[in-house]
Amino acid sequence: MSATTAGGAPAVKAPRVETPFRRFVSEFFESKIATGALVVFTVIVLVAVFAPLISPQNPYDLAQLDIMDGRLEPGSRNAADTMTYWLGTDDQGRDMLSGIMYGLRISLIVGAGSAIAAALIGASLGMLAAYAGGRTDTIIMRLVDLQLSFPTILSALMILAFLGKGIMNVVFALIVVEWAYYARTVRGTALVERRREYIEAAQCLALPTRRIIFRHLLPNCMPPLIVVGTIQIARAIALEATLSFLGLGVPITEPSLGLLIANGYEYMLSGKYWISFYPGIALLVTIVSINLVGDHLRDVLNPRLKK
């Protein structure tokens, strides 16, 4: 039964208020490609998070590896006939399916961790440069120009050649080579927002500089920061895979996707394609899905780019 008012007349349903968040969600899911990419990336994240529960083998546990099971074809069973290697094994007898699941964990942790840390550092310095101006702006932006003048892979290689292998060393190297992108992006946006009336009003109220920057200026710089952060996560994952492939990334006891690809590179021409092929596909799907989501986020958060 429909609701009625006190006088017996049918009640008028209140119109649904369209909030900015609802409008953002509606516009984002209008794209089937971006929606599909988001679903794929969500599945990848869930697989990586629950890898210890769903993977057939722990590829980090050397006690579970048998060298006699090395380089088995996809669909083969182990020597004890108790386990099927659906994607084959590598030269160490490691199950490729399990290796990919655990490798995704390392790649996502390194990529997301370095991107978040670099965003915090770069965004803070970018806003400080835009708000303070003068000599502070000049010093920070010259550091940004200096950082961006070096090839990214070369800078990361030099850092890791000095620090050595290790997940934390890789994260540190990626932070060093990524923070400048955030600083330049945020500074450009903050320079525009700094001339707005709400910033002038906050200054007239004698609010602390830190509060003006982080409570008023930063929230209005978030849209481009979110887009850059999404793209940089994919870039960090690809860079970590490159470093691991070159032998300067994560240790061999905790292989990422890049190291799994490197393990099978020498067997590519001998017909044992699966050792490098399947980790490469997993890496490709991960990077493409993130880039598709980030590209559509750019269109949604910047109405001027809409066709």
Image (spheres, rainbow, N blue to C red):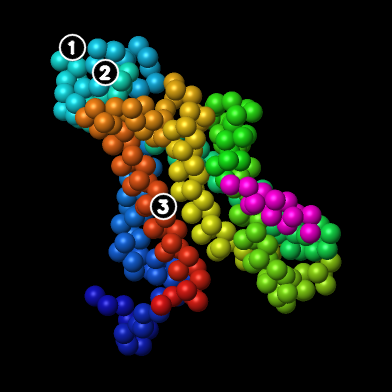
User: What's the residue at 59%, 25% (across, down)?
Assistant: 164
User: What's the residue at 21%, 22% (across, down)?
Assistant: 72
> Is 30 on the left or on the right of 237, as rendered?
left
Q: Which numbered circle lies on residue 290?
A: 3
- State whether residue 98 appears in this view: no
Q: Is residue 249 magenta?
A: no
Main SS of the magenta segment? helix
Pointer 2 or 1: first along the chain: 2
Depth check, front residue: 40 or 212:
40
Find residue 8 and report its image quarter.
bottom left
Find residue 59 and report its image quarter.
top left
In this view, the mark in front (2 or 1): 2
Residue 121, given in percent of the width and then of the height, sits at: 67, 48
Q: Which numbered circle lies on residue 70?
A: 2
The amino acid on which the numbered mark 3 sits, given as a three-letter code, is: Ile
Residue placed under numbered mark 1 in the picture:
80
The amino acid on which the numbered mark 2 sits, given as a three-letter code, is: Gly
Depth check, front residue: 296 or 43:
296
Under circle 3, the secondary element is helix
Residue 168, given in percent of the width and then of the height, sits at: 57, 31
Q: Residue furthest front?
A: 269
In contact (CB < 8 Å): disc 2 and disc 1: no
Q: Is residue 150 magenta?
A: yes
The amino acid on which the numbered mark 1 sits, given as a three-letter code, is: Ala
Query: In the rendered structure, which segment of residues is drawn in magenta?
Result: 138-151
In this view, the mark in front (2 or 3): 2
> Is 3 on the left or on the right of 109, as rendered?
left
In contact (CB < 8 Å): disc 2 and disc 3: no
Pointer 2 or 3: first along the chain: 2
Report how far apart the C-alphas of labels 1 and 3 lie in the structure.
40 Å
